């Protein structure tokens, strides 16, 4: 495989692709530096917040840890943005969808034998109320019978709580039909009493039903649990399953609950920064305060984002295409990701354990959907040299990703620009270079004919580079070759002119000697001298013939004649002159009209036939044929005999070239085929000599253009 200069330079330009690779490595190093810087910043913030929270000792008071141990279930109530409309539908909870927790066959339900019951649940508070939603999946809903006070004989919601006085209270919510519901307080020795302060709405859904309730915060202590009881048989009305947020079989096994303190939240919000989340946990890993979110508010945009949106609206088609290209190529920051800790009430990760042991820690984690990486930095909170909790601050890698993407975009843009410019320059340079070399090659080809003759000189360029030097060298070389070839071509006429007078003098001297010397010995010597003189005369005659032909060709006018008639007439003459040699002539019945000089064609044929006679095998036939093709007429002469030497085929038609045996008694200067070439060139024909396919002889072809 050969590569042109243009392709080689283009391949060389591919080395520019290493530029974005090095840039990519640099950006990766920058990303690591940005991560370390982000960790240091969050650590400093966490340390600052921990110092501030040391003044809030009441937040970590022993009252909240009376029943606390590491494995206890815990519920942290998150703030709601607005009051929930109690209608049994989940529209108001849509923006808190990631806070739902699924309850089904868990550790609190050891006796469940079917999986027809499950529910999703979350709680939140707004001002003076605790709101709770239960999305229950139940294959069969059984309502309470009208007028019946047996609350446990139908599907119902159980609420167990420690009130603000420290007493255990149990409530059941059931209904006869979907709609507005109130709780009933279970009494030991009395019928259940309605508790109108706990209200809600029961609505059926395709998969079961929803229960939406509201509880005044002043009724709550610090322990609570919820459970859904399922009754499937309307006749037997026995509970088949109970699934709860705590151990549903033990009303005293409640989950600790913390409603965020407005004072603490206000304090944390003052020192909260950007799109981040700040956690506060006690020494039992329970969340006691949380502020912020890792997801931006989708309905708010800052000045930069508004400017970007404005730019996108006014951007060109090319910019839009490039932006789409970058979105597909680069990992884009996303606000839509699965946050596995968004509804967490207990944090037991290694970084939290490290903080509660008294040491700050950092930890990167990937979200379950692998969309975002989250950095968590924890720092212990100490009061009186005792670790009472920990502060944790979380941030996503969105800011790093944005900076990284911008760097990649700049790198890609600059790389593309550099590659395009460099490639364009190299291609233009290679094109100009290859064109100059191609022009030099074409000039050299046009200066030398296919038979090796120099047709003309080359115009030397004035360029000062290497190609200019090469062009001038070629021009000088062709000039010298032209002069030398002209000398060789005129040498025959010069020799003929210079030798004619000495030969005449020698001939007259021999004539005088013959008249004076009659002895037999002298006669033999004179005879040999005369034979040599005759050979010199023949040489001069043939040299003169070639010279006269060259001069005559410039003055002759072409006429239209029948080539087959001329060839046929000549063949008849050859048969008469050479009765011992067979000649075979073939010509199709076509029009072989040709523009030229018939006498020259006959002379050309004389030379080719004479050559065939000299080299033909005795007893073989010399074949002559004329064939007409689309663009030319071919005159073919072939004979059986000796082959052409392979090293002489290209020079056979040059002047003074002969391939005859050196022992030949006849004088041959190699001018016969040279004359053939001159006549062929005059008729704008090509003459070709080749060995026959079976190597049995030689074939000459003269191809005349139509």
Image (spheres, rainbow, N blue to C red):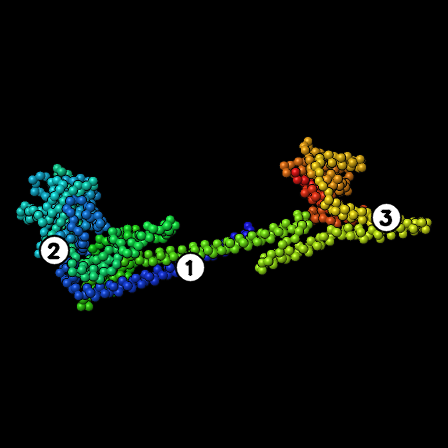
For the residue pair 497 and 388, the one nearer the viewer reads as 497
Q: Which mark is residue 531?
A: 3
Q: Residue at x 94, y 49 (%)?
A: 515
Q: Nearer the viewer, mark 1 or mark 2?
A: 1
Q: Residue at x 18, y 65 (%)?
A: 54
Q: Earlier in the sequence, mark 1 or mark 2?
A: 1
Q: Which mark is residue 22?
A: 1
Q: Earlier in the sequence, mark 2 or mark 3?
A: 2
Residue 107: x and y in percent read: 20, 50
Task: State which quadrant residue 348 falls in.
Answer: bottom left
Instruction: Count residues near mark 3 (Cα–Cα under 10 Å), then give few for <14, some for 14-19, many for 20+.
Output: few
Q: Which mark is residue 221?
A: 2
* In this rendering, position of residue 39 left or right of residue 259: right
* In this rendering, position of residue 698 left or right of residue 11: right
Residue 616: x and y in percent read: 75, 40
Residue 160 sits above or below residue 47 on the image? above
* In this rendering, position of residue 515 left or right of residue 183: right
Residue 393: x and y in percent read: 25, 60
Residue 360 seen in the current view: no
SS type, badge 2: loop
How far apart marks 3 and 1 lie (CA) works out to 90 Å
Q: Nearer the viewer, mark 3 or mark 1?
A: 3
Residue 582: x and y in percent read: 77, 35
* In this rendering, position of residue 682 left or right of residue 499: left
């Amino acid at each position: 495989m050969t590569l042109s200069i243009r392709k080689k330079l283009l391949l060389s330009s591919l080395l520019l692709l290493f530029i974005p690779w090095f840039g990519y490595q640099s950006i990766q190093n920058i990303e690591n530096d940005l991560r370390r810087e982000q960790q240091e910043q969050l650590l400093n913030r966490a340390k600052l917040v921990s110092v501030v929270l040391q003044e809030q000792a009441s937040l970590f008071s022993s009252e909240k840890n009376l029943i606390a141990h590491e494995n206890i279930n815990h519920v942290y109530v998150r703030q709601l943005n607005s009051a929930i409309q109690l209608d049994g539908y989940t529209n108001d909870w849509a923006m808190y969808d990631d806070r739902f927790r699924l309850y089904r066959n868990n550790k609190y339900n050891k006796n469940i034998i079917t999986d027809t019951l499950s529910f999703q649940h979350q709680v939140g508070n707004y001002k003076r109320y605790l709101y709770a939603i239960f999305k229950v999946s139940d294959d069969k809903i059984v309502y309470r019978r009208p007028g019946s006070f047996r609350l446990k004989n139908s599907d119902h919601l159980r609420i167990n709580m420690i009130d603000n006085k420290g007493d255990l209270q149990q409530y059941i919510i059931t209904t006869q039909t979907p709609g507005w519901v109130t709780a009933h307080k279970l009494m030991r020795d009395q019928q259940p009493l309605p508790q109108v302060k706990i209200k809600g709405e029961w609505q059926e859904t395709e998969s079961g039903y929803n229960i939406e309730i509201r509880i005044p915060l002043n009724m709550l202590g610090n322990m609570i649990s919820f459970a859904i009881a399922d009754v499937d048989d309307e006749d037997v009305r026995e509970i088949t399953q109970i699934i709860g947020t705590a151990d549903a079989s033990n009303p005293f096994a409640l989950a600790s609950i913390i409603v965020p303190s407005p004072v603490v939240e206000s304090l944390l919000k003052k020192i909260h920064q950007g799109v981040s989340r700040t956690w506060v946990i006690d020494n039992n890993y329970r969340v006691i305060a949380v502020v912020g979110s890792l997801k931006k508010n989708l309905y708010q945009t800052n000045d930069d984002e508004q400017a970007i949106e404005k730019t996108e609206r006014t951007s060109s088609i090319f910019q839009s295409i490039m932006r789409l290209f970058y979105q597909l190529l680069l990992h884009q920051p996303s606000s839509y990701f699965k946050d596995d800790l968004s509804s967490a009430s207990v944090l037991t990760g290694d970084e939290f354990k490290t903080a509660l042991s008294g040491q700050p820690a950092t930890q990167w984690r990937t979200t379950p959907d692998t969309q975002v990486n989250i950095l968590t930095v924890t720092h212990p909170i100490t009061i009186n040299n005792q670790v009472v909790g920990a502060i944790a601050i979380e941030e996503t890698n969105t800011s790093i990703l944005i900076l990284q993407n911008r760097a990649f975009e700049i790198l890609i843009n600059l790389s593309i620009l550099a590659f395009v410019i460099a490639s364009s320059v190299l291609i233009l340079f290679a094109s100009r270079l290859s064109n100059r070399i191609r022009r030099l090659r074409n000039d050299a080809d046009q200066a030398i004919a296919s038979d090796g003759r120099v047709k003309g000189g080359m115009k030397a360029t004035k360029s000062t580079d290497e190609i200019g030097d090469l062009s001038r060298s070629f021009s000088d070389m062709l000039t010298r070759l032209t002069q030398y070839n002209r000398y060789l071509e005129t040498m025959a006429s010069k020799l003929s002119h210079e030798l004619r007078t000495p030969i005449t003098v020698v001939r007259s001297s021999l004539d005088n000697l013959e008249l004076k010397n009659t002895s037999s010995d002298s006669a033999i010597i004179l005879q040999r001298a005369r034979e040599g003189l005759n050979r010199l005369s023949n040489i001069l005659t043939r040299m003169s013939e070639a010279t006269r032909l060259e001069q005559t060709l410039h003055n002759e006018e072409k006429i239209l004649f029948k080539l087959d008639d001329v060839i046929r007439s000549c063949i008849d003459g050859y048969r008469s002159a050479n009765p011992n040699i067979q000649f075979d002539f073939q010509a199709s019945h076509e029009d072989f009209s040709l523009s030229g000089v018939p006498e020259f064609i006959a002379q050309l044929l004389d030379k080719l036939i004479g050559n065939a006679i000299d080299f033909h095998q005795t007893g073989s036939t010399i074949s002559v044929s004329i064939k007409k093709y689309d663009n030319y007429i071919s005159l073919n002469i072939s004979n059986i005999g000796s082959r052409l030497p392979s090293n002489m085929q290209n020079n056979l038609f040059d002047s003074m070239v002969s391939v005859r045996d050196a022992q030949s008694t006849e004088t041959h200067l190699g001018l016969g085929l040279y004359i053939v070439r001159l006549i062929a060139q005059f008729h704008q024909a090509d003459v070709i000599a080749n060995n026959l396919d079976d190597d049995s002889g030689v074939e000459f072809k003269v191809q005349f253009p139509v």
